[in-house]
Image: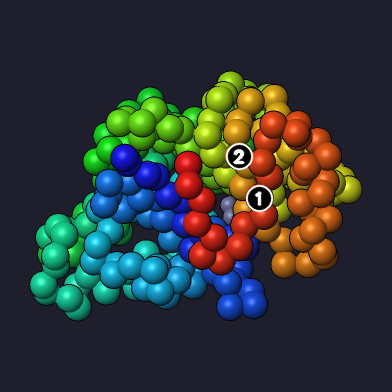
């Protein structure tokens, strides 16, 4: 039986804190290892879980440092290890709104930059991935990842403020990861979601599990968790991101 796991490598928004890195996840199915975002502190977290040479691909949601700061050192890691047990060159996918950035993902004999856009369907190993551009100060793409042999679905909102179209894009997901950078009482212009919006999104999209991530470094995160639970339904299992938390999808 194929089991799909999502591992939390880092979960803070903006900057690492308390020995935990920024937003990054390792999605594994059938020995295929997809790293989703690669922020600050996340290479060492990856090393604590798997040999980085066992990655099959890396997917970057948007070009903010808290989602891509460790790309450079990941490239050096591959450069400095000649014997690669898995594949010879690691593909790193970024959106095509900045082709110079995609180009910077090329590193001789180590990594290769590849691009996607809102209309792309990426087939990476067991996964089929579609995208939706969301709302953030830089182009940012939510992703809906289908594991083809099991039909399990992971949706990751990337960084965005809440907007209604996210409900359709997240419909019936088995695991929904939301950018929950604010407590429920956050007022004014936002570039991220609140705990309450995350809870409502999970409920209205009929998602089975909700992972609150891209968390703030302040306040009591149990309050954030409770606020999300209050707005979601009892059918949704709501989880707070923790370092190395492993979730079966
Ligand atoms: Zn971020
Ligand atoms: Zn961002």
Residue placed under numbered mark 1 in the picture: 239
Of 69 and 37, which appears nearest the observer? 37
Res 209 label: 2
Q: Answer with the quarter of the image where residue 47 lies.
A: bottom left
Residue occupying image coordinates x 70% and y 53%: 181
- Report helix, strand or loop for mark 1: strand
Measure how far apart labels 1 and 2 are at the Cα level.
Answer: 8 Å
Residue 55 seen anywhere in this rendered image of the structure: yes
Residue 102 seen anywhere in this rendered image of the structure: no
Q: Are marks 1 and 2 in contact (CB under 8 Å)?
A: yes
Residue occupying image coordinates x 12% and y 60%: 88
**Residue 4 at x, y = what percent?**
39, 45
Q: Quadrant of ligand 1?
A: bottom right
Q: Answer with the quarter of the image where residue 90 lies.
A: bottom left
Res 177 label: none
- Report helix, strand or loop for mark 2: strand
């Amino acid at each position: 039986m194929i089991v799909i796991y999502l591992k939390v490598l880092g979960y803070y928004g903006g900057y690492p804190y308390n020995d935990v890195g920024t937003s990054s996840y390792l999605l594994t199915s059938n020995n295929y290892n997809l790293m989703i975002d690669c922020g600050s502190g996340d290479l060492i977290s990856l090393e604590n879980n798997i040999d980085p040479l066992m990655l099959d691909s890396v997917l970057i949601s948007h070009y903010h440092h808290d989602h891509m700061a460790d790309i450079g050192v990941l490239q050096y890691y591959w450069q400095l290890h000649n014997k690669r047990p898995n594949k010879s060159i690691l593909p790193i996918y970024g959106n095509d709104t900045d082709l110079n950035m995609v180009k910077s993902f090329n590193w001789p004999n180590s990594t290769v930059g590849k691009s996607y856009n809102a209309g792309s369907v990426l087939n990476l190993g067991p996964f089929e991935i579609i995208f939706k551009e969301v709302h953030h100060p830089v182009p940012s793409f939510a992703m809906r990842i289908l594991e083809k042999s099991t039909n399990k679905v992971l949706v990751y909102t990337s960084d965005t403020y809440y907007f209604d179209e996210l409900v359709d894009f997240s419909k019936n997901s088995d695991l929904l990861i939301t950018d929950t950078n604010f407590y429920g009482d956050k007022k004014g212009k936002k570039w991220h979601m609140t705990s309450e919006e995350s809870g409502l999104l999970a409920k209205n999209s009929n998602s089975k599990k909700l992972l609150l991530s891209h968390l703030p470094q302040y306040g009591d995160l149990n309050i954030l968790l409770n606020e999300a639970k209050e707005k979601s339904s009892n059918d949704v299992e709501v989880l707070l991101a923790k370092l190395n938390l492993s979730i079966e999808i």
